[in-house]
Amino acid sequence: MTVTSDVAQSIRDLAHKEYPHEACGALLGNDHAITEVLPLPNSTTEEARRRFRIRPEDYRRVEGRAEATQKKLIGFFHSHPDHPAAPSAYDLEHAWPNLVYLIVSVTRDGAGELTAWRLSEDRSRFDKVITR
């Protein structure tokens, strides 16, 4: 799995724009590459600096976009303000199997490392998919 450089830059830009809150969005593409990012509103009712939530209607909109463009929903991205680009215990509790979770580390100075993860089959951990 790869991520195109323009998609990676879009994610970094969105993360920096939303800082100090978590940015989030959907990842579309094919079996080999993430080729499109769809920013989504962070609808969490918890602390937006540490959590993100995607509304059902936004998920349906993403599915519609994927179908209309003949792409697949690969997964989701979110930012970790002032934290490493590694999954948290909260991420593990809320992840769905078969999706990629791309995380970007962001500070007030900008976004940095991108890492991508997939939930293990036994749901006990994340396995790294790509790093950029």
Image: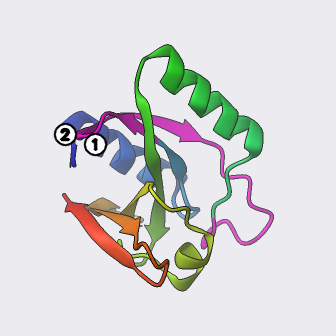
Q: Residue at x 48, y 48 (%)?
A: 17
Q: Secondary structure at mark 2?
A: helix
Foreground residue among 36 and 117: 117
Q: Is residue 80 above or below residue 78?
A: below
Q: Which residue is mark 2?
A: 5
Instruction: Locate residue 93 relative to residue 118 in the image: left or right.
Output: right
Is residue 130 shown in magenta? no
**Residue count near mark 1 (Cα–Cα under 10 Å), binned few <14, some 14–19, many ≥20:** some
Residue range (magenta): 27-51
Expressed as whole percent of the image width and height from the top left, the position of residue 117 reads 35, 65
Expressed as whole percent of the image width and height from the top left, the position of residue 124 reads 47, 84
Q: Residue at x 24, y 34 (%)?
A: 6
Q: Which residue is mark 1?
A: 9
Q: Is residue 8 above or below residue 114?
A: above
Image quadrant in which the C terminus is located: bottom left
Q: Residue at x 63, y 69 (%)?
A: 51
